[in-house]
Image (cartoon, rainbow, N blue to C red):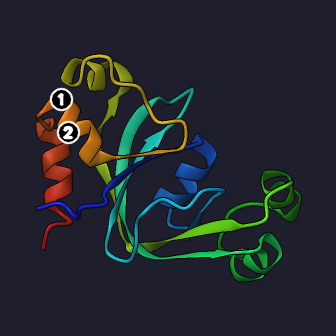
Amino acid sequence: MLPDNTILLSIQPRFAEKIFERTKAVELRRVRPKVDRGDIALVYVSSPVKALYGAFSIEKVITDTPSKLWQIVKDIAGVSRAEFDHYYRGASVGVGIFIKLSSVKTLNNPMDLDRLRRDWPHFQPPQSYRYLRSILEEYDRCPSRLQSLMAQYCY
């Protein structure tokens, strides 16, 4: 059984690469998804890759002011201070989704967007994130490759 709050995160290729290399231990967001420790994040790598690439377990989620968040994540976020400040410009809060690095898994064969759309007609990658449950309810099925990936997280 999947955790209730499994999410599909869209992540830029350079940041996704760092996650799968285990050199980026926190994913930064402006909006806090309803996830917590032990929930699963599926990683959809955005353009130009356009593929569901893998997943990780969430260690914890923190929400704080951008300046306080920077002090916590500066060595593990995979971004420069200038990039961080640009991303959070105008925001009063920032969110850090901490990655349990030992849980990072990749699909042997990433599911490209065409494949995802064969399994889930009219599938649209999320702009930021989407709950997997809402996708499964819409299509009433889960691709077998995704099922096998998710089975690794269902202890």
Q: Which residue is denoted by mark 2 in the rendering? A: 136
SS at circle 2: helix
Q: Residue 111: give x, y in percent of width and height.
A: 30, 32
* Mark 1–mark 2 distance (CA, rounded to whole Å): 5 Å
Q: Residues within 10 Å of mark 1 (few under 14, many from 20)?
A: some
- Location of the C terminus by quadrant is bottom left
Dividing the picture into quarters, in which one does residue 145 lie?
top left
Q: Residue placed at 82% from the left, 55% from the top? A: 83
Q: Residue placed at 50% from the left, 67% from the top? A: 22
From this view, report whether residue 72 is shown above or below residue 8.
Answer: below
Q: Which residue is denoted by mark 1 in the rendering? A: 139
- Location of the N terminus by quadrant is bottom left
Q: Nearer the viewer, residue 125 or 111?
A: 125
Q: Residue placed at 46% from the left, 57% from the top? A: 20
SS at circle 1: helix
Amino acid identity at mark 2: Leu
Q: Residue placed at 11% from the left, 39% from the top? A: 144
Q: How many marks?
A: 2
Left or right: 73, with 47 as reference point: right
Left or right: 71, with 43 as reference point: right
Q: Residue 79: give x, y in percent of width and height.
A: 74, 60
Dividing the picture into quarters, in which one does residue 74 lie?
bottom right
- Marking on residue 20: none
Q: Are marks 1 and 2 in contact (CB under 8 Å)?
A: yes
Q: Residue 40: give x, y in percent of width and height.
A: 32, 62
Q: Residues within 10 Å of mark 2 (few under 14, many from 20)?
A: few
Amino acid identity at mark 1: Tyr
